[in-house]
Amino acid sequence: MHFPTTSILLTAGLAGLAAAAPAPTAPRTKVGTVSINQVRNPHFKHHGKRRGQKVLAKTYLKYGAHMPAGLAKIMTTLHIPFNLDLSIGGLGKRNGTNSHGSAEAVPEKDDIQYLTPVQIGTPPQTLNLDFDSGSSDLWVFSSETPSRQVNGQALYDPSKSSTSKKVDGQTWSISYGDGSASSGIVVTDNVEVAGVSFPSQAVEVAQKVSSSFSADENNDGLLGLAFSKINTVKPTRQTTWFDNVMPNLEKPVWTSDLKNDAPGTYNFGYIDEEAYTGEISYVPVDNSQGFWSFEASGYSIGNVTVPMKFQGIADTGTSLAMLPQEIVTAYYKQVPGASMSYSLGGYVFPCNAKIPDFTYMVGDVSIVVPASFINYAEADEAGKKCFGGIQPDTDIGFSIFGDVALKAAFVVFDVGTQDQPRLGWAKK
Ligand SMILES: CNCc1ccc(Oc2cccnc2)o1
């Protein structure tokens, strides 16, 4: 997640671990959503249901030369970047397919983050980005990033793209829950993810990145999947890639199927019925702070179940599960030798301790986070102390269901009907 103000950070001993942070005080700008029923293209060849494979449906998303006036009108109520030419005929050729796509989410060491390839510009420049449902900026390492701050990352060079356009007078600056930050200027260019493209996506070009980004050599930037209202571009807030492509997706949804120490999947525009078991249980989302915020209804540690309502955000960009202190205390009480270590930055325990599973209840489903996900990583040189995957949410007013929690579930991020987004949760 991101926040524009400084915050009391839980400085984690492990680089890249996210801590909680106060909610952003982003101005309230209503961002409408639109979902339009498309007529399925009879010529569209469905690739069928291939489990977890990198099936990139090469359905190129092109805007029709004759966008119906009604749709053009709807689009203008969206927070469309001022630079997008909405005039009829101003956009390329829509091929009318119901667009959808599937992309791999490849974990870094200890599942600290997951990286997904994104094609930017013409000819395409591929960067591996951290898809972050806790922020709403698409920013990249670039030819504008000082070389002393670059350490192996792939760089986007707008001057090498025939479709890039500088956006004068616009800048951005963002900081994240783990204390990392970046800032720069803005261009628009074609951005394609899993075969779904948008021709004039705001691409935020980094002119400055903090040391933890510089040290993060495989991470070429972030692609924000929270709500556009917390995008940081000033003076004209920009729209996320998902909000831009959503009107042309089969369904106004994207899904996460992250895995433990293995590549997972982000799907866009459809729900892979083979990716989960049982039923998907939907809960309403309060996006007033720009996050995918929902209410959990309880938890279990081992075989003790406690009904307890608490608010949390689904945040693919945060590594750990940052939960209410009450839950964290109850959990580590069940772990022999566990303690809160301020020097190591959180709860640690002997690496050979027997630790319990953790279950969270949301809607009608119970998601079991296996103990192996919670024995997160070695926390000290000797390898004696291990860092917990569950940490306190430092009382920011809501919890953060980061990757440790999300990778135990199949999650549907559903922009859904007008103004009522929802989250779908399923076991898998
Ligand atoms: C490793 N630190 C740099 C870094 C990688 C990803 C991010 O971004 C974050 C961090 C915390 C929460 N949300 C997004 O920062």
Image (spheres, rainbow, N blue to C red):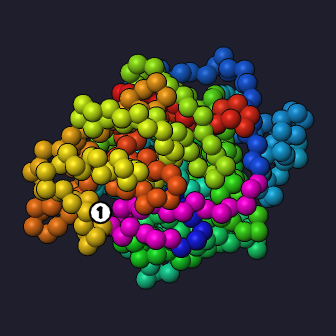
Magenta-tinted stretch: 7-29
Placement of 372 over or under 217, stated as above or below: above
- Helix, strand or loop at label 1? It is strand
Q: Residue at x 67, y 45 (%)?
A: 243
Label 1: which residue? 346
| Quadrant, the C terminus | top left
Placement of 410 over or under 214, stated as above or below: above
Residue 120 in percent (x, y) is at: 57, 55
Magenta segment: does it hold 305?
A: no
All told, the count of numbered labels is 1
Q: Which residue is drawn at 40% across and 41% down?
A: 406
Magenta span: helix, strand or loop, mainly?
loop
Residue 39 in percent (x, y) is at: 72, 20
Q: Which residue is drawn at 36% across and 35% down?
A: 306
Magenta segment: does it hold 24?
A: yes
**Hey, which quadrant is residue 257 in on the image?**
top left
Residue 289 in percent (x, y) is at: 63, 53
Label 1 CA crowd tier, 10 Å (few <14, some 14–19, many 20+): many
**Hey, which quadrant is residue 3 in on the image?**
bottom right
384 sits to left or right of 197: left
**Hey, which quadrant is residue 60 in on the image?**
top right
Q: Which residue is drawn at 41% across and 51% down?
A: 324
